[in-house]
Image: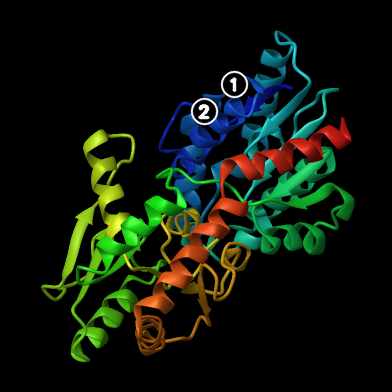
Amino acid sequence: MKAAFVTTSPSSDRFTWSGINYSMQRALENAGWTIFPIGDLKYPWKPLFHFRRYFNRILFSQQYLLSRDPAILHSYARQVSRVLKTMEVDFVFSPGTIPIAYLETDLPIFFWTDATFAAMINYYPHYSFLSPVSIRHGHAMEQSALDRARLAIYSSAWAAQSALTYYSADPARVKTVPLGINLDPGLTDEDLSAVLEARARGPIRLLFSGLDWKRKGGDIAVRTAEILHGRGVNIELHIVGTTPEGPVPPYVYTHGFLNRFIPGHLRKLDSLFRSTHFLILPTRAECAAVVLSEASAYGIPSLTTDVGGNASLIEEGHNGYLFPLDAGAESYANRIQQLLADRETYSKIAHMAFQVYSSRLNWRKSIETVTAKIREVL
C-alpha cells in the first residue's frame, strides 16, 4: 500500500501532537506501508492573518483560529495537490482533517484523528471564547473533510459519536481505532513479573504526566498524595511534563519536561514508568490520553476521569478505573488503598493492564485494523 502521508508540519517533527504524527508514520512503515510524506505546509499573507487574530483578541476578547481560516485551508489543499501530482500513490492518509479538508483529488482520502471540531468547542482552553466566524469556519472545514473522506477513523467512541451526531456522517464511513503509543518498553510477561517484584520493594509511587497542570488536574493528584501520606502510606508523587502551581510537599518530585527522543530523558522516563504503581490523571478535559495506553504497556493501572475518549482506552477493573468529573482526591486515595490491600490484588490488575495493551492499545494491532478497513474500501 502506497500512501501520501499528509500533515501540516513535517511528519519528522517529533513534537507535533505529542509525537503522534512521527510515531504513526514509523508504525505504518513498519507495517509494510510505503509512505510518501507531504508536510511543512505554508500559509500566505502571515502579517494579515496575525493582525486579524490580534484584532479579535484585543477588541472583542475572542480567539480567531488561523488553523480554520478558509484562505489558509485552501492554500494547504493547493500545496498538497501540487505535490500529489508528482507521486504515484494509492490513496491519501492524514492524522488530521486540517490539511485535507478542501483537497481536490481523485485519490481516496482517509484520516485518523482524536476529535472533531464540534467536540473541542469550549472544551480545551484553546477552543474557548472563539469568534463566531472561527466557529463557522471550523464547522465548514470539518464537514468538508468528512464529506471527502472514504473513511473517518477516530481514536475513541466519543470522537466518532461527535462526527455522527453533529455532522451527520455516514456511520459506514466512521470507524473507531485507538492510537498507539510513543513510549513502548517492549516488555514480556516475564519482564513484567520482574518489574512488579522491584515495585514491591519501594515506596508507593504515583505518576502524573501532562503538559497542562490545570487541565490535567494536577492539584487533585497532589491532594491525593497528601491524603495517602496522612493515612500513613509511604507515598511518592512524580510529576512529568509540567510544573506544579504553588508549593508541594517533600514527597512530591517534579521532573519537568522529558523529551523521549533524548536518550538521557528516555532512560529517566523508562525508569519512572517501571517503578510507578499507579498513573493518576484527574484530567478536566481530554480527547484520549495516550499516556493511559503507555501506562498499560508497563503494567500500570490508570486512575483517570471519565471524560472525552478516555473510556475507549480504560477497561474498568482491567487496566484502570474511571472517575466522575466531580470526584475528589479522597475517591482516588480510597481506590489506591483498596488496590494495595494485598500484593496479589495489585499484581493481578497490573498483569491485566499489560494484557489490555498487548491485545489492542498498540500500534501493531491498531494498524492491522486500519489497514484491513482501508483494503475493504479500496
Q: Is residue 232 left or right of residue 66?
A: left
Is residue 303 among the parts visible in the rendering? no
**Identity of the amino acid at label 1?**
Pro
Residue 304 vs 175, above or below: the answer is below
The residue located at (73%, 43%) in the rendering is 369
Density class for disc 1 (Cα within 10 Å; few <14, some 14-19, many ≥20) is some
Q: Give residue 255's quadrant in the image.
A: bottom left
Seen as rendered, the residue at the extreme left is 250
Q: Position of residue 196 (x, y in %)?
A: 33, 63
Q: Is residue 342 left or right of residue 98?
A: left
Residue 294 vs 33, above or below: the answer is below
On residue 37, the disc is 1
Density class for disc 2 (Cα within 10 Å; few <14, some 14-19, many ≥20) is many
Q: Is residue 138 left or right of residue 345?
A: right
Observer-nearest of 279 and 198:
198
Observer-nearest of 269 and 150:
269
**Identity of the amino acid at label 2?**
Ser
Q: Position of residue 311 (x, y in %)?
A: 61, 68
On residue 159, the disc is none
Where does the C terminus fall, quadrant-wise? top right
Q: Give residue 330's quadrant in the image.
A: bottom left
Nearest to N terminus: mark 2 or mark 1? 2
The residue located at (63%, 63%) in the rendering is 312
Is residue 292 among the parts visible in the rendering? yes
Q: Is residue 163 left or right of residue 330?
A: right
Residue tagged 2: 11
Whether pointer 2 and pointer 1 mark residues with C-beta atoms closer than 8 Å, the reply is yes
The residue located at (75%, 63%) in the rendering is 161
